[in-house]
Image: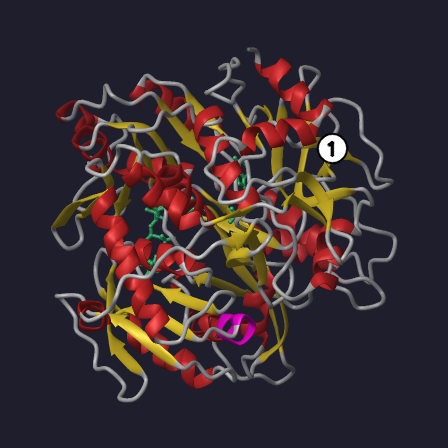
Amino acid sequence: MTYQAFYDRSMADPESFWMEQAQGIDWITPPAKALYKDGNNLYRWYEGGQLNTAYLALDYHVENGRADQPAVFYDSPVTGVKRSITYRELRDEVAVFAGVLKAQGVEKGDTVIIYMPMIPQTVVAMLACARIGAIHSVVFGGFAPHELAIRINDAKPKLILAASAGKEIDRVIDYMKIVNAAVAEAEHQIEGCIVYQRDFHQADLVEGRDIDWEKAAAKAEPAACVPVDAADPLYILYTSGTTGKPKGIVRDNGGHAVAMKFSMKYVYGVEPGEVYWAASDVGWVVGHSYIVYAPLIHGCTTVVYEGKPVRTPDAGAFWRVIEEYKVKVFFTAPTAFRAIKKEDASASLKAQYDTSHLRYLFLAGERCDVATLEWCQAVLQVPVIDHWWQTESGWPMLANMAGVELLPVKPGSACKPVCGYDLKVVGPDGEPVPPNTEGAVVIRLPLAPGTLPNLWQDTTRFIESYLSPYPGYYFTGDGGYIDEEGYVFITGRIDDIINVAGHRLSTAEMEEVVAAHPAVAECAVIGIHDDLKGQIPVGFVVLKAGADTEEAQLEKELVQMVRDRVGPVASFKKATVVQRLPKTRSGKILRRIMRHIVDGKPYSPPSTIEDMSVLPELEEKVKNL
Ligand code: COA
Ligand code: AMP
């Protein structure tokens, strides 16, 4: 079967294509219909289908010959702990923890926030929620209390599941300190918090609110899998939008399970029983899809790695893990390899390890620069596949579908659309542009199964953000072009979202914080190129008249404010004072022009610009950053 024939089938008759793919999972009640519309007139998949995602990820395999196969290899260079967990053991742990949740009154449809590091208990927490039909929302550990509070207010969880601590290279992160501050800030009141105590740092539990994870599990009864509808939410994952408020991306159960299974076989070209490793964090969509759900639904062994590509202990860490667990398919962000390359340019440490089991390396999360792609190809001697997707899609939209047919790689391109995605590049009029012409990347509706059906309790924002900009299409927020052979090149976001070390961040969120400084009259936060992280944010600030502050001191204060409010993950380390910001006559800051200036790209100021003379000053400032 060729890629083109398979893709064309998915386009010609999506309903029968996806009904056929749905047979790949074990439904409680198979769906009667593939595609339908819900009460909001939005597309949904698999009407009438009933299933349980945790059953598919665990019990199904225990009952079908994989009980003693490792489900998880936990490898934690930051704590020195390694643990192999079989499918049976993981199923049992999950069933018991689901019993803990039930005993705390969590029921089908309730929401639960998970604020935990890269440990097996986080996987247990997610699957335990899925087992009883509760909706989890995992929050990445690098976010500050305020960001956690925003998510608590929006998701309105009954419980928070947390760990006492996480470990970064150089320090212990006191997770409960962050949880306590977030709970104090949030308006929504949680009913309780279940805390997993880590050996190296025990948290003081709050009486009447906190429960010790292990003590509760010791006396819990295992809970059975609860059937849910295909359209019922499995999880909410908040991601940066173009305003200060993150978007709650909803994932359903049915379409998601089918898409996870489909992508493992046809995109990643991996077989059940093989080891699949995504070096990311469960707090991101990559972690949800390719550390937890897809590998387990597919019957693979997943690696939960609590470490970094470098300094835990060195730039050979990835090669070690690939050798030790005989990883077949590996997935990470290009920034991880840029970090390795920076410390060990010739990959000399690789000589100590046998990585010959590796079949493919997949890269995503940010634009893959050609130098990194070529370095990975040379070092690993396997196909290196740049593929493109986002939190909203939940799985790849552009890829070289290794499980179908490997197409020649074109550096700089994330290859061609994955089955189910009718991708176009359109101009401002919404019409497709000619080959090699840049425009907005959109997907013709309906989107494939597993993609977001809506935002959490905000249909209006969903429609305004994604469906209204180009009627009939889903707007991805990315720009790009398609060459004459159908290869797609993603050139970057065309909104105010930036990508820092593969982490998606909103400049609007940072602007809210910077603007709150008493000396700041107005500001713009723009992403500038960074050799390691791809992009980093820089604040351009205009001072209030008469503000009495040194620029260096102001920068220090702003850096600390963003760290405290958004979190260290923002990597906000630079702020510079300017006399004025480029604006339209109606007062709108011309962020697009600013983005072009910092990227050194040609730009033509709009006729509505208030004052052209502001631009040379900005160009000068940028040169000195
Ligand atoms: N909990 C608490 N703090 C965290 C955290 C977590 N889970 N994750 C990151 N942080 C902190 C870091 O300690 C760092 O703090 P610092 O400013 O005090 O140094 C800050 O947030 C920025 O983190 P990060 O962007 O990860 O930078 P880094 O310098 O620690 O590491 C890389 C750089 C490239 C090694 C790292 O980003 C990486 O491994 N990236 C891989 C790609 C990836 O995971 N992408 C996710 C999507 S696929
Ligand atoms: P996230 O939702 O955090 O996964 O971020 C998604 C965004 O990351 C996309 O909208 C792109 O801007 C960017 N991105 C992800 N993968 C790629 C890729 N392979 N090439 C270019 N940009 C990418």
Q: Is residue 298 magenta?
A: no
Q: State the residue in front, 568 or 559.
A: 568
Residue drawn at x 57%, y 66% is 509
Q: Position of residue 186 (x, y in %)?
A: 49, 82
Residue drawn at x 55%, y 72% is 514
Residue drawn at x 57%, y 24% is 415
Q: Secondary structure at mark 1?
A: strand
- Name the image quarter holding residue 201: bottom left
Q: Position of residue 145 (x, y in %)?
A: 41, 74
Q: State the residue in front, 350 or 517.
A: 350
Q: Position of residue 235 (x, y in %)?
A: 50, 57
Give the main secondary structure of the magenta stretch: helix
From what the image shows, is residue 366 above or below residue 372? below
Magenta residue span: 150-155
Q: State the residue in front, 358 or 503.
A: 358
Q: Amino acid at mark 1?
A: Val
Q: Quadrant of the N terminus?
A: top right
- Name the image quarter holding residue 614: bottom right
Instruction: Confirm or reject: label 1 Cβ below 8 Å from ligand 2.
Output: no
